[in-house]
Amino acid sequence: MIQLPKHKQLVLFDGVCNLCDASVQYIIKHDKNNAFLFTALQSEVGQQIIKEFNIDTNKIDSIILYSNEHGISYKSTAALKIASKLGFPRNLLSVFLIIPTIIRNWVYDYIAKNRYKWYGKKEECMIPTPDLKSKFL
């Protein structure tokens, strides 16, 4: 089991997706409380969590949020829980958690399915700069 530092949450993302990479950069920029750590789904830690929680990567292949206290969240729930920690006005997006998950995930899945076509794909996962290395597992 992955043990994160107290009060930290781990964002697992598709390391070759340009949209996902831009989203991680956005989260880092607005994470004023230093609440998040990051790892690519393709990384050793990412693969360990996928295996530990028996996650079907054919159904969930974009964003996953993991915390010691709350376990796993994915898709729209993960995105909205992340937004809730990013301060005003981004935290207001968490109001969408009242929308049934099936509806939120339909929208999320549509974007996720088209993310490579719309935003492109990298040949390999991003390598964090020395400044950001402490935020990645």
Image: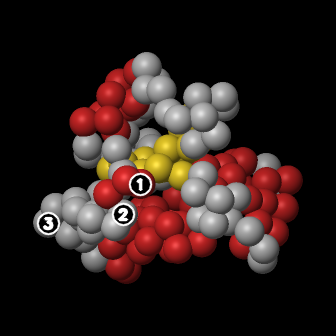
Distance between the Cα atoms at labels 3 and 1? 22 Å
What residue is drawn where x is 34% and y is 39%? 46
Distance between the Cα atoms at labels 2 and 3? 21 Å
Q: Is residue 111 visible?
A: no
Q: Which mark is residue 123?
A: 3
- Looking at the image, is mark 2 or mark 3 earlier in the sequence? 3
Q: Which mark is residue 135?
A: 1
From the viewer's side, name the closer residue of 101 and 131. Answer: 131
* Residue 97 spot, x, y in % from top left: 79, 54
| Secondary structure of residue under mark 3 | loop
Check whether the beta carbons of the residues at disc 1 and disc 2 lie within 8 A of each other. yes
Q: Is residue 113 above or below residue 35?
A: below
Distance between the Cα atoms at labels 1 and 2? 6 Å
Q: Which residue is mark 2?
A: 132
Q: Is residue 98 left or right of residue 31?
A: right
Q: Residues within 10 Å of mark 2 (few under 14, many from 20)?
A: few
Q: Is residue 107 above or below residue 65?
A: below
Q: Nearer the viewer, mark 2 or mark 3?
A: 2
What residue is drawn where x is 44% and y is 71%? 25
* Residue 116 spot, x, y in % from top left: 32, 70
Q: Nearer the viewer, mark 3 or mark 1?
A: 1
